[in-house]
Image: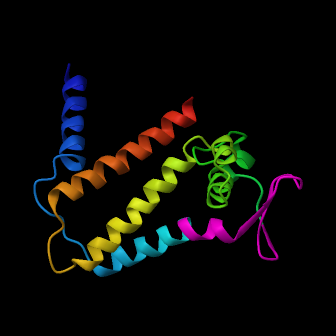
Amino acid sequence: MAMINRLINYWRRFVNYFFLVDKPYPHDRGFHISYLVFMACFLLLPIVIKFKASEKEALSLGACKLPSSCLSRELFGTPCPGCGLTRSFVCLTHGEFAKSISYHRMGITLYVFFLFQFFYHAYCLNVLSKPIPIKLQRINAVLSTGMIVLLLVNWIL
């Protein structure tokens, strides 16, 4: 019974932390800039990455060849939750939607989520002197948690 009560308390803390935001959290310029750079890389690099299905699905960035396999797959023999996302993003940015879904079922959803994150942090950077609206914080928390859960469920299935 004590174990169940402990789990319930952990669940309550989790829900309160992620979903029931009751006050704006502090934000700083460096955090939002680093997030913007990170998201810009995820959104823009697939546009310039070349991908040849005929050469064992090799990816290249200019003359530089990128690794063709996931480190998790190499070390443990099992794909990670993100296996295929790079190829999915590359196909998506080149307009090949069906191929994008064939490489990773969550590719399009995650790309749209990264777009949301980019604009969310751009907005936060723009209103740095003011608190972020609580409703927007909740939306961001729910979407972020949802993406993690969906990636894990997709991986398990």
The quarter of the picture where residue 32 lies is bottom left
Q: Which residues are magenta?
A: 43-65
Q: Quadrant of the C terminus?
A: top right
Q: Quadrant of the N terminus?
A: top left
User: Any magenta on residue 48?
Assistant: yes
Residue name at image x 65 percent, y 48 percent: 100
* Residue 143 percent across, percent down from the top left: 34, 49
Foreground residue among 151 and 109: 109
User: Any magenta on residue 15?
Assistant: no
* Residue 106 percent across, percent down from the top left: 54, 44
Foreground residue among 38 and 49: 49
Residue name at image x 46 percent, y 59 percent: 114
Residue name at image x 21 percent, y 46 percent: 19
* Residue 74 percent across, percent down from the top left: 75, 48
The quarter of the picture where residue 58 lies is bottom right
* 12 w.r.t. 60: above or below: above
* 28 w.r.t. 135: above or below: below
Outermost residue, left direction?
Answer: 22
Foreground residue among 96 and 64: 96
